[in-house]
Image (cartoon, rainbow, N blue to C red):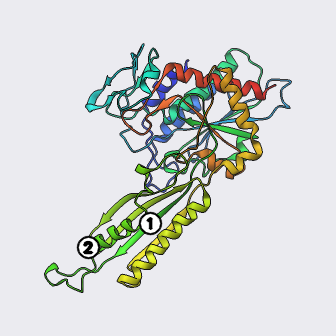
Amino acid sequence: MKAYERLIKYAKVWTTSDPESETCPSTARQLDLARILEEDMKELGLSGVRLDKNGYVYGFLPATPGYEDKPSLGLIAHMDVSDAAPGEHVQPLLHKNYDGGEVVLKGGTVLSPSRFAFLPRLKGETLITSDGTTLLGADDKAGVAEILTACETLIRENIPHCRVCVGFTPDEEIGRGADLFDIPGFGADFAYTVDGGDAGEIEYENFNAASAKVTVNGFSVHPGDAKQGMINAVNVGIEFQNALPRFERPEHTEGREGFYHLDDFRGDVSQVTMHYILRDHDLAKLMEKEDTLRLTEKLLNERYGPGTVTVEIKDAYRNMLEKIRPHFHLIETARTATRMAGLEPVEHPVRGGTDGATLSYMGLPCPNLGTGGFNFHGKAECTTVERMDKCTEILLNIIGLYSK
């Protein structure tokens, strides 16, 4: 089975995660795909296949006799999809010999080169999209498919190889994908997550991340008698937001530039709750952003009274670069493997998070590789058959290089 065929099979399984859930996995529907993967891995001939109580799926290919002294290599992808677009009833479509132009899908979804500059580069390839009413789910079911296709190729073609450890995680899209990952049981010396963008991408830097909850406690008085009595929590919340650097927002930043992102604002005169995500590749600058929130809290409380504004900050993941540097052979190997596949490596910092960052800090060095996809988390998500094949080839090249 080719990688794109697996993607089509897995994309039809609804696996949207839920950030409000406190269970693991956050949605029982992720187990539907986990069980399918468990069976597929067994049918392929992987050893030690297991689905644990938290929804993680593990298995491995034992080293070929005579290759037991080679490193144990891990390959990891996630099963859940983002809740930013509908993920149920996905109907993947193949557009053979794509002409590089506009693609009109259902529900008013249009893939246009005027909006998506990468599209002309896909001309002549077989484009894969949803029907336009849902996301496709290539993030990260393409990664899942490519890993299993690489394993199938090793087995079918009897290619000598090192031990290859495979792991599929739930809840990556809500930042919990690696939280309960069984690193000792996984058995890899180091690993790659296969969860990036275009074929040939190699990512080993990511944002340092934190979240903040801001609560504004107002005081409601009848508007006709409100002078010097009312504290309108909505207005104080707006004042809080406007006190932050207005051009340090996602819509004004790129590359290694960090940001404050107001993700949610809700409430009324009496109380408002605001949720922020804070991001920066430079840890010191992230700490400065946290200090700015605390200073704004202090100044508004001096103006409106103690307890009017409370800020709760929670640190999340950290930049994996610090943990990858001592194992930079992972990047050098990925570069070589990419060039062997006829592509030039593309390296850039991740403007987000990845399971690999958390795993790296848990003791499993784990940079990220591209899957051949574009426009993740939306109805215009797409990939191509050929780019998925290239990503599978890169994985096989990596395995081969570590098996020498």
The quadrant holding residue 158 is top right
Is residue 49 visible in this depiction of the protein? no
Which residue in the structure is indicated by mark 1?
213
Amino acid at pointer 1: Lys
Q: Position of residue 52 (x, y in %)?
A: 61, 44
Q: Is residue 324 above or below residue 389?
A: below
Query: Which residue does the image show at 76% across and 26% down from the upper left?
Result: 401
Q: Secondary structure at mark 2?
A: loop
Viewer-nearest residue: 173 or 115: 115
Is residue 115 visible in this depiction of the protein? yes
The quadrant of the picture occupied by the C terminus is top right
Amino acid at pointer 2: Val
Label total for image: 2
Which residue in the structure is indicated by mark 2?
269
Q: Is residue 277 above or below residue 167?
A: below
The quadrant of the picture occupied by the N terminus is top right
